[in-house]
Amino acid sequence: MSKISTDEDAFYKIYEQVAEDGIRATLGEGERILKEDILNRPGSGKIYRRGGKEHQASADGEAPAPDLDNLRANTNANPEIARDGEDFVGLIVADAEYAEALEKGTERMAARPYFGKLENDYAPQLEAAFRRGAGE
């Protein structure tokens, strides 16, 4: 008879690395989708003139229309993976000062959700990115 055993600590280290790799791949894909698709769509709202340039804003409920590209340039995946109890947590962060107001809206402006669109409309692509990153 032969006995086969596992080193539980080694097993969990492998599990953690696979999970982190999957999350990093998901974050990269999420950042790409936000920058190349969601935050790259022209708006269908009001047309403004500013500094001799014309800008068509997003309509209520649309993702923000590109203008100066500040929001897109300041939306990035954080490479650090954190732990929250048993969960691994990765973040895509929008550092533009008005990012939260666009996402959630204000009393004077309807929401222009972009993170919400990522979560709701791109779940299959994000899941596929996780699977690829985790080596499935």
Image (tube, helix red, strand yellow):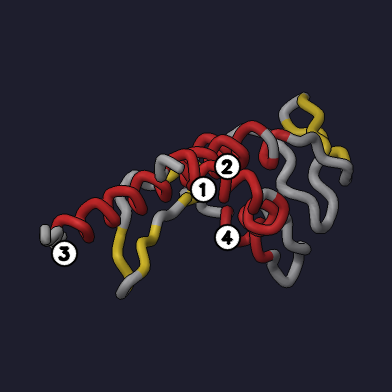
Identify which residue, 48 or 51, lies in the foreground.
48
Q: Which residue is mark 3?
A: 8
Residue 3 pos. (x, y %): 11, 61
Q: Are marks 1 and 2 in contact (CB under 8 Å)?
A: yes
- Element type at marker 2? helix
Instruction: Give the amino acid type for the residue marked by disc 2 in the picture.
Output: Leu
135 left or right of 42?
left
Q: Quadrant of the N terminus?
A: bottom left
Instruction: Give the amino acid type for the residue marked by disc 1 in the picture.
Output: Ala
Q: Residue furthest top?
A: 52
Q: Which residue is mark 1?
A: 96
Residue 48 pos. (x, y %): 83, 38
Q: Which residue is mark 4?
A: 100
Is tag 2's residue or tag 4's residue first in the polypeptide sequence?
2
Q: What residue sits 48% from the left and 39% below the top?
A: 132
Circle 4: is it few (<14), some (14-19), or many (20+) Cα within 10 Å?
some
- Element type at marker 3? helix
114 left or right of 57?
left
Q: Which residue is mark 2?
A: 71
Whole-number angstrom distance, CA of label 3 to CA of label 4: 43 Å
Is tag 3's residue or tag 2's residue first in the polypeptide sequence?
3
Is tag 3's residue or tag 1's residue first in the polypeptide sequence?
3
Identify which residue, 92 or 83, lies in the foreground.
83
